[in-house]
Image (cartoon, helix red, strand yellow):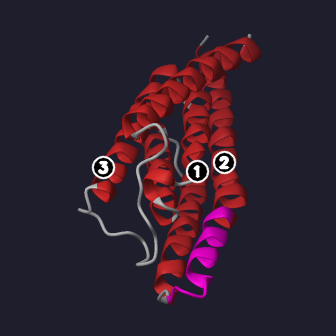
Amino acid sequence: MALKSWSLKVRTLLALQHEVGWLVAARLVMFLPLLTGVSLVICGSQRMSCQPRSIIAPVLLVIGFSVISLAYLRYFTSHRLFIYSQILFDLAAVTWLVYMSGGPISPFLFLYIPVTMAAAIVRSRNTALVASAIGAALYSVLATAMLDRKLATFNEFQVIAAPAGGLLTQILGLISAMALIAVATSFLVRKVNL
């Protein structure tokens, strides 16, 4: 009986390492090129002169965090806090990308949704719902601060405007979409794992 329990624990740990490994790989393959591209486009415009660190620092931070995460997966077996740190890092990275690309009117607002999906896949529906609330709160604070001119734009030539339909409508739409995605993804994960 103890051997069967131990075997189940090892299989669960390996499955979790595999899922989190895919999460880190997705960050490197999908988000990193997007962050790099947006940084280069924003800083490469004729009207803008960016310091190299404004492009390099976020990219190096994503790479460094991902490498450390992969090393952690290889050598440690306690993953609960680690998974939460991955989700929070991804939410912060998406918020940075939204900030760089226009804040309240950023075309990259949808990137909060894959983070919610990942939280539902690697943890649970409740974790995904909490990630949704945190993501919406981060966006709300960012957009409000930028619209109230308490937070400067990423570059001096960006024009900040309220989203069409208003900021409240956009925030409610974002939180609704993220909550729906959290519930749907966790439902599908349970169906697939049956």
| Residue located beneath label 3 in the image | 144
Compare residues 172 and 74 and report the one nearer the observer: 172
Compare residues 33 and 20 and report the one nearer the observer: 33
Q: Is residue 40 magenta?
A: yes
Q: Does the magenta stretch include residue 102?
A: no
Image spot of residue 49 (x, y percent): 50, 89
| Residue located beneath label 2 in the image | 21
Residue 73's disc is 1
Q: In this view, does 37 lie above or below 66?
A: below
Image spot of residue 136 (x, y percent): 41, 38
Question: What span is colored magenta in the figure?
Answer: 34-49
* Majority secondary structure of magenta residues: helix
Q: Is 185 placed left or right of 51 in the picture?
A: right
Quarter of the image holding residue 129?
A: top left
The answer to whether mark 3 and mark 2 are in CB contact below 8 A is no
Q: Residues within 10 Å of mark 1 (few under 14, many from 20)?
A: some
